[in-house]
Amino acid sequence: MRFDSLWKESQATAADAEAVLPMVPEGTHVGTVKWVKWDTKDEVKSSDNKDGTVLLVLVDVHGYKPFWSNIPAHYRGKIEALCRAASIDTPDPSVDWDEQELKGRAVTVDVLHAISRAGNQYVKVEKWKPGPKPLPAAIRKAPPRTPAQKADAAVKAAGGDDDIPF
């Protein structure tokens, strides 16, 4: 008889495994943006941000417990720094921006340990370090080549350079 489906201690979950991971040490680390979402928080409400809108970002550094970074929506410089760290274009204020573009991107961060008002220790992102510059949009989203364009490229690669079919 197997007891793995009956006994709870054999059913370890990802959350259990994450709980035993150590906190990211202070310093510079490379991680991956695992989750990103807009939310509201009362503590960031101000005259510039009446709703208290924040960008919640979960960063995972391999071998350590993932940590959160909350960026108030009116902190343009920090949101742009996050985009530069993820090597994506910074948001254009006049165009809708999809924050999901950050998901899965590698980022380099300088982190410190801080103590919350409740007395809990947490990881605080001190600086988002810029990554490589993003490719121009025309290169990132190049339209697929048509069969005629592929054939033309093959002819030119073979040494032919005229359009005469004989």
Image (cartoon, helix red, strand yellow):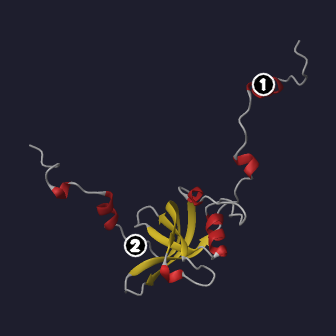
Q: Position of residue 109 (x, y in %)?
A: 56, 70
Q: Callout 2: few (<14), some (14-19), or many (20+) C-alpha neighbours within 10 Å? A: some
Residue farthest front in this picture: 50
Image mark for residue 75:
none
Does label 2 or label 1 sit earlier along the sequence?
2
In the picture of the structure, the residue carrying the numbered disc 2 is 23
Left or right: residue 69 versus residue 84 is: left
User: For residue 51, which quarter of the picture?
Assistant: bottom right
Q: Where is residue 142 in the image (x, y as percent from the top left)?
A: 73, 42
Compare residues 84 and 75 and report the one nearer the observer. 75
Q: Is residue 21 above or below residue 149?
A: below
| Label 2 secondary element | loop
Compare residues 102 and 153 and report the one nearer the observer. 102
User: For residue 166, which quarter of the picture?
Assistant: top right
Q: Say which amino acid is labelled 2.
A: Met
Image mark for residue 148:
1
- Callout in the foreground (2, 1): 1
User: For residue 12, which quarter of the picture?
Assistant: bottom left
